[in-house]
Amino acid sequence: MDHQHTLQLNGSAAASFTCSGCKELGFESSYICENSNCNYILHKECAEPVKHAVHPFFKNCNFEFIENSEKEGAGFCDGCGKDFSGFIYLSQKKGFFKRLLGFRYALHPSCLNMKENIMNDDGNVIMTLSDEVSMSQGIGGPLVSLSLPIVDP
Ligand SMILES: [Zn+2]
Ligand SMILES: [Zn+2]
Ligand SMILES: [Zn+2]
């Protein structure tokens, strides 16, 4: 983390905020900067990243935390389908479709931690964790690829 000030956990459920790390919205507990002139704010997940992470949707796939995803080039999150910039978890293996383009799977820290439900912008659950993501459920977007195998480069 290249932020010089000390961050402290903001326990009270604040209004929604935009995370300075991953640029995504946050709603629950956050870390805020002690310096009141600074509006640096992070998701809890972004303030306490794990070096290596796994996600149940991506079997046999390890994710590593990258602070500066700009260096990795453009891409989108495989959890929510939105573009990413800033903090991101990238898989060590390349995605099944993304392999052709040389891309790895990517998950926002907040998407990685959304282990049970994935919600759309309106807060509706569009996906609930199950062992197998069925292709027949009519789920649009990038989530469909989650049930596909991960192939070694
Ligand atoms: Zn600060
Ligand atoms: Zn964040
Ligand atoms: Zn995401």
Image (cartoon, helix red, strand yellow):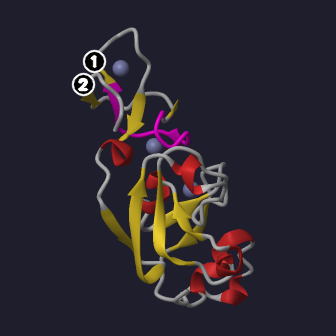
Could you say whether the residue bearing mark 1 is in a helix, strand or loop?
A: loop
Expressed as whole percent of the image width and height from the top left, the position of residue 90 reads: 48, 64
The one nearer the camera, 134 or 39, is 39
Expressed as whole percent of the image width and height from the top left, the position of residue 26 reads: 48, 40
Residue for badge 2: 6
**Residue, x 53% and y 50% (percent of image)?**
69
Q: Is mark 1 within 8 Å of ligand 1?
A: yes
Vertical order, 4 against 114 (above or below): above
The one nearer the camera, 45 or 100, is 100
Instruction: State yes or no: discs 2 and 1 in contact (Cβ < 8 Å).
Output: yes
Query: Which residues are drawn in magenta?
Result: 20-32
Identify the mark at residue 34; answer none if there is no mark: 1
Decide whether residue 28 is among the magenta residues: yes
**Residue, x 51% and y 31% (percent of image)?**
17
Vertical order, 41 against 71 (above or below): above
Expressed as whole percent of the image width and height from the top left, the position of residue 5 reads: 28, 22
Count residues near mark 2 (Cα–Cα under 10 Å), then give few for <14, some for 14-19, many for 20+: few
Instruction: Identify residue type, mark 2.
Output: Thr
Q: Which quadrant of the frame does ligand 1 lie within? A: top left
Q: Quadrant of the C terminus?
A: bottom right
Q: Earlier in the sequence, mark 2 or mark 1?
A: 2
Instruction: Identify residue type, mark 1.
Output: Glu
The one nearer the camera, 107 or 98, is 98
Q: Quadrant of residue 54?
A: bottom left
**Residue, x 35% and y 10% (percent of image)?**
36
Main secondary structure found in the magenta portion: loop
**Residue, x 48% and y 78% (percent of image)?**
57
Total tally of numbered discs in the picture: 2
User: Does residue 118 appear to the left or right of 12 in the view shown?
Assistant: right
The one nearer the camera, 129 or 51, is 51
